[in-house]
């Protein structure tokens, strides 16, 4: 990500969603991460989609305050990785990115920085019979632990199933 930014490959705004989010690209222009600045979350002061408010105010859903989403995404990753059956939260951390691409506010922003995962769509694009019951249950358990009130078929990405390598066995 650093190499891409240093070589002038600017993050690209993502149209979907209610907050500001950006594809972060490497030096070859490949999407490698998604960055969501704290001050561009829904109901935050620099939200580029017209849903502006103050950090700390009640957000779209009761119980989730504007400016807390980045920490909630990090918590989701940390909690998910502790379980044998995972919900599939991509590696996530907090990061600060300095670029002039942001529509509102400063050029230096802090937010969630999550590994980009290619997908074939969302669960809303597929029939429910395609999903593994244990995977669906893992997502439900994660949502309960996080008190997530924002789960819907548009925010679960679907990937083609790939064989998982097992230690000591050749494939």
Image (tube, grey):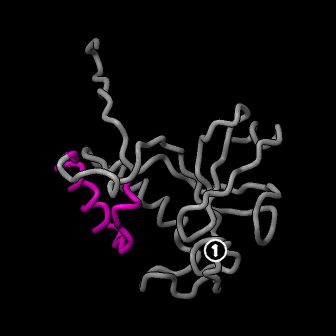
Q: In the image shown, does 56 or 20 lie closer to the viewer?
A: 20
Helix, strand or loop at mark 1: loop
> For mark 1, what is the residue?
49
User: In the rendered structure, does residue 148 fall within the stretch colored magenta?
Assistant: yes
Q: Quadrant of the C terminus?
A: top left
Residue appearing at x 23%, y 51% in the figure: 127
Q: Quadrant of the N terminus?
A: top right
Residue appearing at x 66%, y 75% in the figure: 47
Relative placement, left or right, of 66 versus 97 is: left
Quick check: 121 above or below 94? above
Quick check: 21 above or below 18? above
Relative placement, left or right, of 54 versus 149 is: right
Q: How many marks?
A: 1
Relative placement, left or right, of 65 versus 164 is: right
Picture quadrant of residue 77: bottom left
- Give percent across and percent down for residue 105: 78, 72
Residue appearing at x 65%, y 64% in the figure: 37
- Give percent across and percent down for residue 56: 58, 84
Q: Which residues are magenta?
A: 130-156
Quick check: 136 above or below 57? above
- Give percent across and percent down for residue 121: 41, 48
Relative placement, left or right, of 23 versus 72 is: right
Residue appearing at x 70%, y 76% in the figure: 46
């Amino acid at each position: 990500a650093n190499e891409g930014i240093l070589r002038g490959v600017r993050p690209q705004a993502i149209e979907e969603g209610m907050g500001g989010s950006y594809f972060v690209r490497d030096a070859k222009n490949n999407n490698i991460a998604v960055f969501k600045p704290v001050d561009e979350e829904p109901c935050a002061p620099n939200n580029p989609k017209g849903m502006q408010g103050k950090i700390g105010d009640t957000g779209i859903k009761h119980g989730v305050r504007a400016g807390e989403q980045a920490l909630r995404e990090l918590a989701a990753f940390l909690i998910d990785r502790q379980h044998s059956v995972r919900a599939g939260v991509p590696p996530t951390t907090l990061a600060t990115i300095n670029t002039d691409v942001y529509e509102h506010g400063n050029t230096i922003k802090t937010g969630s920085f999550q590994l980009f995962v290619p997908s074939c769509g969302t669960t809303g694009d597929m029939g429910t019979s395609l999903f593994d019951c244990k995977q669906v249950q893992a997502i439900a358990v994660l949502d309960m632990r996080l008190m997530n009130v924002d789960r819907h078929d548009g925010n679960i990405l679907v990937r083609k199933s790939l064989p998982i390598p097992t230690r000591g066995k050749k494939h």
